[in-house]
Amino acid sequence: EAAVTQSPRNKVAVTGGKVTLSCNQTNNHNNMYWYRQDTGHGLRLIHYSYGAGSTEKGDIPDGYKASRPSQENFSLILELATPSQTSVYFCASGVRGPDTQYFGPGTRLLVL
Amino acid sequence: GDKVKQSPSALSLQEGTNSALRCNFSIAATTVQWFLQNPRGSLINLFYLVPGTKENGRLKSAFDSKESYSTLHIRDAQLEDSGTYFCAAERNNNNAPRFGAGTKLSVKP
């Protein structure tokens, strides 16, 4: 079973502060993804990566940066957090090819 | 606009009955995934589909890429089937699935 972990699981941040959400996968998957989930919107794609050193913009990248320093790790960075970024963030990994995504448990972020 | 539209947005079923959930795509989807988000918030993989059908126990899913839709059929609904069902579609050469807004299913005794 694919394993994807996220840290922290819960975070309270102040407006204007910097927030880093971390994701680790131990399955040697090439692809990793960051989504946010808000009521009525399902999961919306923020950034994704095809491998170490690569990052791609998803559908809602504004206000977020991503970093993929290694095959295992993919971070989402909020340089200047805003209350509109309060959400649940999910990381996922997947192979390149016919297979499903595997999701982490999610991180609840509250920006005050 | 919405690339993946799910219907209905919410559904209440009596235990033991059957139902179908649907996803319509405005993108040229080549693969579809179905997930269940349980009440704890965890996303559970149900199906990964290329055009065709798959079955697993009481669940059956179909994906028609030409007509741009997918369905998830639930047979003999059980209380533990409650949760939110999401579909996600992927386009060829763009390996990042896009999700629908979900169908919230409540199964009642």
Image (tube, rainbow, N blue to C red):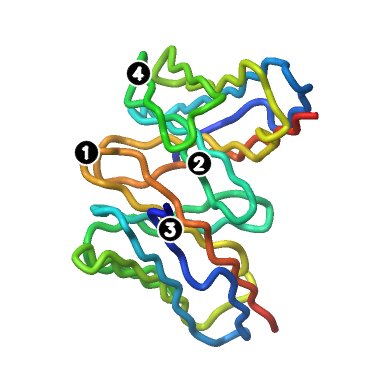
Q: Which residue lies furthest to the front in this view?
A: B1
Of labels 4 and 2, earlier in sequence is 4
Residue B27 on image: x %, y %: 29, 53
In the figure, B60 relative to A2: above or below? below
For discs 1 and 2, the disc positioned in front in the rendered view: 1
Q: Is residue A3 visible?
A: no
Alpha carbon distance from label 1 to label 2: 22 Å
Which numbered circle lies on residue A54? Answer: 4
Q: Is mark 3 on a helix, strand or loop?
A: strand
Check the residue under mark 1 and report the chain it is in: B
In the figure, B109 relative to A112: above or below? below
Alpha carbon distance from label 3 to label 2: 14 Å
Alpha carbon distance from label 1 to label 3: 19 Å
Mark 2, Cα crowd under 10 Å, few <14 / some 14-19 / many 20+, is many
Whether marks 1 and 2 lie on the same chain: no
Of labels 1 and 3, earlier in sequence is 3
Which numbered circle lies on residue A28? Answer: none
Mark 3, Cα crowd under 10 Å, few <14 / some 14-19 / many 20+, is many
Alpha carbon distance from label 3 to label 4: 26 Å
Which numbered circle lies on residue A103? Answer: 2
The residue that label 1 is drawn on is: B93
> In which quadrant will I find the C terminus of chain B?
bottom right
Residue A25 vs residue A9, the one in the foreground: A9
Q: Can residue B75 be seen in this view?
A: yes
Whether marks 3 and 4 lie on the same chain: no
The residue that label 3 is drawn on is: B87
x 36%, y 65%: residue: B24
Check the residue under mark 3 and report the chain it is in: B
Name the amino acid, label 2.
Phe
x 43%, y 58%: residue: B87
